[in-house]
């Protein structure tokens, strides 16, 4: 899979988008170094926008920089994963409660449409797009809570969540399974059942949390493959 050439307008954002898709689809594995020169050659651009895009993805939690070695795909530690998911559980539980507290003021149609997009994307088997639509569903849940600060905090976590959810997606052989587990969340919201919603959110996030932990433990026990290190 080669990178596509891109136009100059919005160059850094477009480079960042392609790099993000490469990461979440597993083309770049955690710990792997990005070959800036080769990426720039494939995209038909100079190395400068590739480096700027890499810095942007570092801020989003997808990459990490190494002195004199450039950028590599970030592999969060188990402690960082636990911190991320425990915080995510708190944020989304609060969002769900706040959303239901708004009662009739909340229009759930945007969330219904987002779930439809998620399911349709899963049917196409595009794992990278499924990850993106998955995150949009949860971000929309926070948006509908009406709490702008909550929305801002969750948005700041999406870079790391993007990477981690991608790893979860690699566990699920059928992307439809990853999409369908969102249905009970919407059903609980439509029923206005706060207790069920909290149970579904807890199950939804905790299951993903356990899957990620198991994957990370497997990676720690598996020796690196020969030649794994630079893209």
Image (cartoon, rainbow, N blue to C red):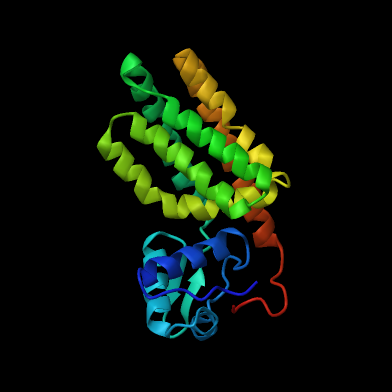
Q: Quadrant of residue 15?
A: bottom left
User: Which residue is located at x 65 percent, y 61 percent?
Assistant: 220
Closer to us: 69 or 150 = 150
Residue 39 shows in the view: yes
Residue 86 shows in the view: no
User: Which residue is located at x 56 percent, y 51 percent?
Assistant: 129
Closer to us: 123 or 154 = 123
Side (left or right) of 99 relative to 63: left
Side (left or right) of 200 relative to 157: right
Side (left or right) of 161 relative to 148: right
Residue 127 appears at what percent x and percent y?
62, 52
Count the marks.
0
User: Which residue is located at x 46 percent, y 73 percent?
Assistant: 6
Closer to us: 142 or 83 = 142
Q: Quick check: 225 above or below 162? A: below
Side (left or right) of 5 relative to 91: right
Q: Quick check: 113 above or below 76? A: above
Residue 147 appears at what percent x and percent y?
28, 32
The C terminus lies in which quarter of the figure?
bottom right
Residue 230 appears at what percent x and percent y?
59, 79
Closer to us: 91 or 100 = 100
Residue 199 appears at what percent x and percent y?
53, 22
């Amino acid at each position: 899979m080669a990178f596509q050439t891109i136009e100059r307008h919005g160059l850094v954002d477009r480079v960042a988008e392609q790099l993000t898709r490469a990461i979440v689809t597993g083309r770049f594995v955690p710990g792997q170094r990005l070959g800036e020169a080769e990426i720039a050659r494939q995209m038909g651009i100079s190395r400068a926008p590739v480096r700027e895009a890499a810095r942007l993805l570092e801020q989003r939690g997808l990459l990490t920089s190494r002195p004199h070695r450039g950028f590599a795909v970030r592999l969060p530690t188990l402690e960082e994963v636990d911190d991320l998911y425990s915080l995510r559980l708190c944020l989304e539980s609060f969002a769900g409660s706040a959303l239901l507290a708004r009662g009739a003021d909340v229009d759930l149609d945007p969330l219904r449409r987002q779930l439809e997009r998620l399911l349709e994307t899963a049917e196409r088997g595009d794992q990278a797009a499924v990850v993106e639509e998955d995150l949009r569903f949860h971000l929309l849940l926070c948006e509908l809570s009406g709490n702008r600060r909550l929305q801002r905090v969750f948005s700041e976590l999406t870079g790391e969540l993007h990477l981690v959810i991608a790893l979860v997606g690699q566990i699920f052989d059928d992307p439809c399974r990853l999409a369908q587990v969102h249905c009970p969340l919407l059903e609980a919201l439509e029923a206005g059942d706060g207790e069920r919603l909290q149970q579904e959110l807890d199950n939804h996030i905790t299951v993903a949390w356990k899957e990620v932990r198991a994957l990370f433990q497997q990676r720690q026990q598996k020796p690196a493959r020969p030649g794994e290190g630079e893209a």
